[in-house]
Image: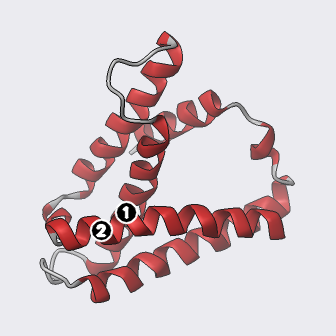
Amino acid sequence: MTKTSTQYRAIISACQALFAKKTRDYGTAWRVLRLPSITDQIYIKAQRIRSIQEKGQQKVDDPIRDEFIGIVNYCLIALIQLKLGETGPMEMKEEEVVPLYDEAAAETRMLLENKNHDYGEAWREMRISSMTDIILMKLLRV
């Protein structure tokens, strides 16, 4: 579990760095998004990944890795939105919103660790394309 926790923290650190940068650049404009709009953004990113996987090539040079980072960030944004609700502040400073991001990421880490305990990290043996399909499947449930 230590390897997974270390890797999780490294990935979240990269995702959080981009989230913080975008917060500095654009503020918390994402606060205007309703949950269906956030899930649509996740869908668009997952669908692009799947399309590139199926076609075996891409015409836009944006790396697939960036799409996965976007998925992580939009998922954490959704959790923050659920916590703040519609009555929460629209504009927030970086030093206010990053702790909320970290809190949501910590909650997901705990869920990952609990599931890893029960499933024995089976996800490590999955194909990336299967993970993309599962993301799309879960979005269709929303």
Q: CA distance from mark 2 to mark 1?
A: 5 Å
Residue 41: % across, % down? 29, 44
Whether residue 109 sits left or right of residue 30 in the image: it is right
Which residue is located at x 50 percent, y 34 percent? 137
Report the residue that reaches farthest toward the bottom. Answer: 95
Residue 113: % across, % down? 74, 68
Q: Tag 1: residue type?
A: Leu
Residue at mark 1: 18
Residue 133: % across, % down? 55, 30
Q: Tag 2: residue type?
A: Lys
Whether residue 36 sits left or right of residue 45 in the image: it is left
Which residue is located at x 34 percent, y 66 percent? 19
Which residue is located at x 43 percent, y 69 percent? 16
Residue at mark 2: 21
Residue 131 position by quadrant: top right
Report the residue that reaches farthest toward the front. Answer: 61
Can residue 31 be seen in the rendering of this structure? no
